[in-house]
Amino acid sequence: MDVIKTAIFDCWIIKPKVFKDDRGYFYESFQQERFQQLTKTVFSPIQDNEAFSTYGVIRGLHFQETPFAQAKLVRSLQGSVLDVAVDLRKDSPSYGKVVTQVLSQENKEQLFVPKGCAHGYAVLSPEAVVFYKTDAYYNPEAEGGILFNDSELAIEWQIPESDRILSKKDLVWPTFKNL
């Protein structure tokens, strides 16, 4: 696997080595020792999550408040999504930065989103299945979010406004400035 630094401190794009032949393909989607060696980041996942969505769905931007903050390793098992991370760590050199990365079943790339970042994604294909590992359990009382279309963050979701599908909750989160 190769890891690529992003504009957010400790947020990584993971590019696996995929072995293909006439039977199909094989790759290691996560190997803890190698991940830690390459990123110098300790990540010990304890929960797996999977979500199915259709074109135009935007989920996020979500996070878990401390002490329930979660690091996430995200990938698309089917289809294509624009994955988004926003650094909310006030002591971080990349505070307020946004990273976007297309994750797809074709490129098999993953995005590692560190604790203290908000996360979301937009479905770019007709359907998508997103899978992610977390290093902490979900706690509904610790859930937080940022308004997906905050003008200060200026995220280009790659979905026309008329095609966007969001939950009621995701339409009313505070802005980054008012968080």
Image (cartoon, rainbow, N blue to C red):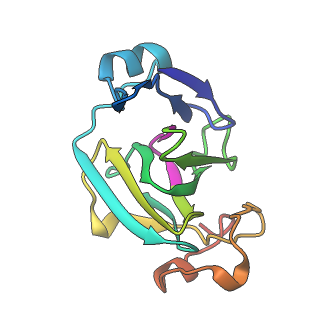
Coordinates of residue 47 in the picture (x, y in percent): 23, 47
Was residue 110 drawn as part of the magenta stretch in this picture?
yes
Residue drawn 77% across the image and 62% down it: 154
Kindly indicate the quadrant of the structure image that contains residue 46: top left
Question: For the image shown, how many numbered marks are present on the structure?
Answer: 0
Place of residue 102 in the rendered image (x, y in percent of width and height, measured from the top left): 61, 48
The residue shown at (45%, 62%) is 128
Q: Is residue 94 left or right of residue 77?
A: right
Question: Does residue 84 appear in this view?
Answer: yes
The image shows residue 170, relative to residue 117, as above or below, that is: below
**Quadrant position of residue 160:** bottom right
Vertical arrangement, residue 23 with respect to residue 56, above or below? above
Who's the residue at 68% across and 70% down the image?
A: 159
Q: Is residue 178 above or below residue 120?
A: below
The stretch of residues the image draws in magenta is 109-118
* Position in image of residue 110 (x %, y %): 48, 39
Please state which of residues 31 and 8 is positioned toward the viewer in this rendering.
31
Question: x, y (%) of residue 49?
Answer: 29, 55
Dominant secondary structure (helix, strand or loop) of the stretch shown in magenta: strand
- The answer to which of 71 and 74 lies nearer the viewer is 74
Q: Quadrant of the C terminus?
A: bottom right
Q: Is residue 84 magenta?
A: no
Q: Is residue 66 visible?
A: no
